[in-house]
Every structure is written in C-alpha cells, then in structure tokens.
C-alpha cells in the first residue's frame, strides 16, 4: 500500500503554514544529520536565516525552497507535504552522497583501500 500524502497549505493562515514548513525543514535537516550552519554555508546564507526559516518567523521564497530541498537531498514536496501514514523513504544524506562522489573520483586502488576500511568498520558496528 502506498503512502498517502496530505498537502498542508493553509492559505487562510500564512503564519501556521510558515511554522509547519519550518518544522518539516528542521526535521528533514536533522534526519540528514546536517546542522543549520552546514545548510547555510551550502546556500551562501547565515545560520540566523536558516533559524528564522525553521522557526517560521521568516517566509521562504519559492526559489529558495527549491535550493533548500536540493541542499537537503530531497524534492520540494518533502518540505511542502505532510505524510499521513508513514514517512517516505529518502536517499542518502547529502553529506554522505558528496563523500561517495569524492571517493568515486579517486584512483581505483584508493577506492579499494577506502572500501576495505569501511567494510572493517561496518563489521564492528
């Protein structure tokens, strides 16, 4: 059975919408293991702006919402839509994804060495 989604636009009360969007932004950021500072740096913003967005005290422009979603490694609907009946699965955290891309660009012998270290660490976990 698929996950049913409910759009949470509350056009009659923009303050409620901003707060709900901020809560989802915070949840997704934390789920990805990222700090406000890391997201702010990625977007060329200050940590204070991200804090204002997450608290729902500052409206997020549409174009910035797209940038936030990309920085978090999710689609904008993850931030705009509230799941009902369970969470939708997401890909790897952006930080992990960037590390994997960096590893992929290394010479094959370096990649093998890194994979051996990762395999050993995961066996101990």
Image (spheres, rainbow, N blue to C red):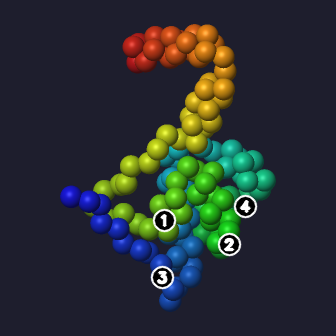
Q: Secondary structure at mark 2?
A: loop
Q: Residue furthest bottom?
A: 12
Of pointers 3 and 4, the one earlier in the residue sequence: 3
Q: Quadrant of the C terminus?
A: top left
Which residue bears the numbered disc 1? 77
Which residue bears the numbered disc 2? 61
Q: Position of residue 44 (x, y in %)?
A: 78, 53
Q: Is residue 99 left or right of residue 92?
A: right
CA–CA distance between discs 2 and 3? Answer: 16 Å
Q: Quadrant of residue 106?
A: top right
117 over 23 or under it: above or below? above
Q: Is residue 87 left or right of residue 16?
A: left
Which residue bears the numbered disc 4? 49
> Few, some or many C-alpha atoms within 10 Å of disc 4 (few <14, some 14-19, many ≥20)?
some
Of pointers 2 and 3, the one earlier in the residue sequence: 3
Q: Please report the residue visible at 39 percent of the width from the left and 13 percent of the height from the top.
A: 123
CA–CA distance between discs 2 and 4? Answer: 12 Å
Q: Nearer the viewer, residue 81 or 16?
A: 81
Of pointers 2 and 4, the one earlier in the residue sequence: 4
Q: Nearer the viewer, residue 42 or 50?
A: 42
CA–CA distance between discs 3 and 4? Answer: 23 Å
Q: Is residue 50 visible?
A: yes
Q: Residue furthest left?
A: 1
73 over 101 or under it: above or below? below
Q: Is residue 99 visible?
A: no
Which numbered marker is on residue 10? 3
Q: Position of residue 61 (x, y in %)?
A: 68, 72
Mark 2 or mark 1: which is in front?
1
Q: Is residue 63 left or right of residue 16?
A: right
Of pointers 3 and 1, the one earlier in the residue sequence: 3
CA–CA distance between discs 3 and 1? Answer: 15 Å
Q: Please report the residue visible at 44 percent of the width from the left and 75 percent of the height from the top.
A: 8
């Amino acid at each position: 059975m698929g996950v049913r989604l409910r759009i949470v636009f509350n056009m009659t009360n923009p303050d409620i919408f901003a707060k709900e969007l901020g809560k989802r932004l915070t949840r997704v950021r934390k789920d990805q293991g990222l700090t406000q500072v890391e997201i702010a740096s990625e977007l060329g913003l200050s940590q204070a702006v991200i804090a204002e967005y997450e608290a729902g005290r500052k409206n997020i422009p549409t174009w910035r919402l797209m940038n936030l979603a990309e920085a978090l490694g999710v689609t904008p609907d993850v931030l705009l839509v509230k799941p009902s009946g369970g969470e939708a699965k997401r890909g790897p955290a952006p930080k992990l994804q960037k590390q994997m891309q960096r590893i992929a660009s290394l010479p094959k012998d370096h990649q093998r060495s890194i994979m051996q270290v990762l395999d050993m660490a995961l066996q101990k976990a």
